[in-house]
Amino acid sequence: MSQVWWVNHKQTVGQEIGGQYLWSPKKDKNGRRIEYYENMRRAQPGDLVISYANRQVNHIGRVAEFAFSAHKPIEFGTKGAQWSNDGWYLPVYWVPLSPPVRPKKLIEVLGPLLPTKHSPLRSYSGDGNQLYLARVSKAVFDVIVSKSTYDAELLLRGGANSLTFQSIAERLDDDAERRIGENLELDDTVKKAVIQARRGQGTFRSSVEAIEKSCRLTGITNRSLLIASHIKPWRSCETAQERLHGMNGLLLTPDADLLFDRGFITFEDDGKVQVSPRFDHEDLRRLGLGNIVSPLRGFSEAPFVWQTDAFAPAQCRYLEYHRRQVYVQ
Amino acid sequence: MSQVWWVNHKQTVGQEIGGQYLWSPKKDKNGRRIEYYENMRRAQPGDLVISYANRQVNHIGRVAEFAFSAHKPIEFGTKGAQWSNDGWYLPVYWVPLSPPVRPKKLIEVLGPLLPTKHSPLRSYSGDGNQLYLARVSKAVFDVIVSKSTYDAELLLRGGANSLTFQSIAERLDDDAERRIGENLELDDTVKKAVIQARRGQGTFRSSVEAIEKSCRLTGITNRSLLIASHIKPWRSCETAQERLHGMNGLLLTPDADLLFDRGFITFEDDGKVQVSPRFDHEDLRRLGLGNIVSPLRGFSEAPFVWQTDAFAPAQCRYLEYHRRQVYVQ
């Protein structure tokens, strides 16, 4: 069942609509996690989004992928300078609403449908509240679109191709690589090693191979079939040290690498595997991962966990990041 | 059981030893396939290689990966200008033999050990023959190294990290991308689409998605888990048209993409899957592909084939290339 979200854009509305995404910092200016930033992580592919800016709804959207941990978009420029660089990037495919809708005019109908807590609009005046992403009911969506028109087919299918996980990950990695290239404090040799590490090559791979000997999910030891994956994603690392640290890596087959990078699987410090409840178990079976361990074989209702070797303390530091910021709960 | 090869380098010995590979054209100057170029495809990871140049053996090597279809290395410059650009690239990890060995001096012992056909040396005079890669016996290797010393540990383990399939594929792709960048006849928009196609993105992906609907190996339809793979590899395509043609693509999960790109699986025109006899069936099972179809489940001795939908004629043209030039027989 898809959820419905309402976003009150700030001054970056143009960048977000044009770039097919939403972006928010992870924490408010006091360093606290707040409901309407946390909602970025709760949005799921297929969810609907109402885009509200300058007192009207100009676009509606469909969430294309789960949120990524991502640096503040370069195209924001000086806008949003008060936000920290560490944020959530939610891929959303937007389509225009024509004509735009002014919710204030509909407040008599909308008011009773708005949530009592964390409402994007004041239910009496119809003015916008100071928040970013809020959950609303499908009825709110229906009222808004009943006053206008949009291309439903485009909303459902359009942009699908450009908003896959892989293409967005590439783009975010490209942005990170550009920032590394422009970093005047990094030595050229280090830059080269860091950029090789993006694809799991070079000194990073050697360092990981000194620690991990096989894919923890499939048991594969054939090096030609293994990728040196970052636990804390390469694009999210803050320093060259983090990007090159062997303790920040696992050897995984390409399927396992994708699932881990996408946050559909993670590990406990003791080596237990966790599979996201948001991940389709039939897909897990088709990927051949459902056959490795007995709890999956029968599609039991129990949580899908299986056991690998316990991690070293230095690995656990990165795993904690993965569980909190990458794993899709 | 590893094989032993003998290479008679031409003027590109420095590039080949320094770059950790062998390279040969696929055909001779008359456009014919010849034994000692075909041997590039017969070499397997773990095989030993004796490097002969300027009348002596300065290096011995270990084959690190099956041969790739690859353009003539840029670093050859004007050397080997007579060779066509379409060739085989065989990753070999070389270690020095110290002191170098002159086979001519050992010809009384070596002579009787040399093959009667396609011998790299004349068995009476000990002079080099006009050929590139020849198969010799382990006894030939033993005689050569008995007169010198080398680091056996380094030969076995060294350089392993830099010569994985993925790192070599990246490097060959980088070379191809550089050539595209320098191609003055290509429009910038086309260049951009062609470069996006390298990672299976952009218009190439859309075109493939219009033709193929799921992974032919796993049945996965979830687009987030699928890669748009080239049938004729991106790095081997000769034109922008080939790189962007939807008929030159399949939708595959990351594991299947790697196996297909590496030539461990291929397809018949009627849709039958072929698994290379060189690929470890235990690895296939661990990757979860052994569980999809019944012939694999029991590890029957029969060839591992299973059936997918028949291909369109335009796809078959690319599949023929894949079967002949990529598939590891």
Image (cartoon, coloured by chain):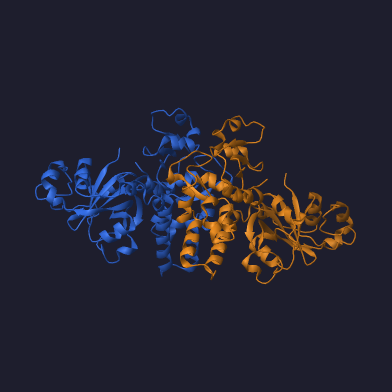
Chain colours: A blue, B orange
Please name whichever residue, B146 or A90, is drawn nearer the observer in this view of the structure: A90
Q: Quadrant of the C terminus of chain A?
A: top left
Q: Is residue B34 left or right of residue A157?
A: right
Q: Is residue B150 left or right of residue A152?
A: right
* A144, B58: nearer the viewer: A144
Quadrant location of residue B290?
Answer: top right
Locate residue B210 relative to residue A9 in the image: left or right: right
Residue A318 percent across, percent down from the top left:
40, 49
* Count of numbered circles in the view: 0
x then y, percent, for residue B285: 57, 36
Q: x, y (%) of residue A26?
A: 29, 53
- Residue in the foreground of this view, choosing between B46 and B8: B8
Task: Identify the residue shown where x is 57% and y is 46%.
Answer: B259
Asked if residue A130 lies left or right of residue B11, the reply is left
Q: In this view of the protein, can residue A192 be seen by the observer?
A: yes
Q: Position of residue B97 (x, y in %)?
A: 73, 60
Q: Nearer the viewer, residue A102 or B167?
A: A102
Q: Residue at x 60, y 47 (%)?
A: B316
Which residue is located at x 40 percent, y 45 percent?
A263
Residue pushed farthest left? A124
* B314 is higher (above) or lower (below) than A218: below
Which quadrant holds the N terminus of chain A?
A: top left
Would you say residue A33 is visible in this rendering? no
Instruction: Indicate the quadrant where residue A78 lies.
Output: bottom left
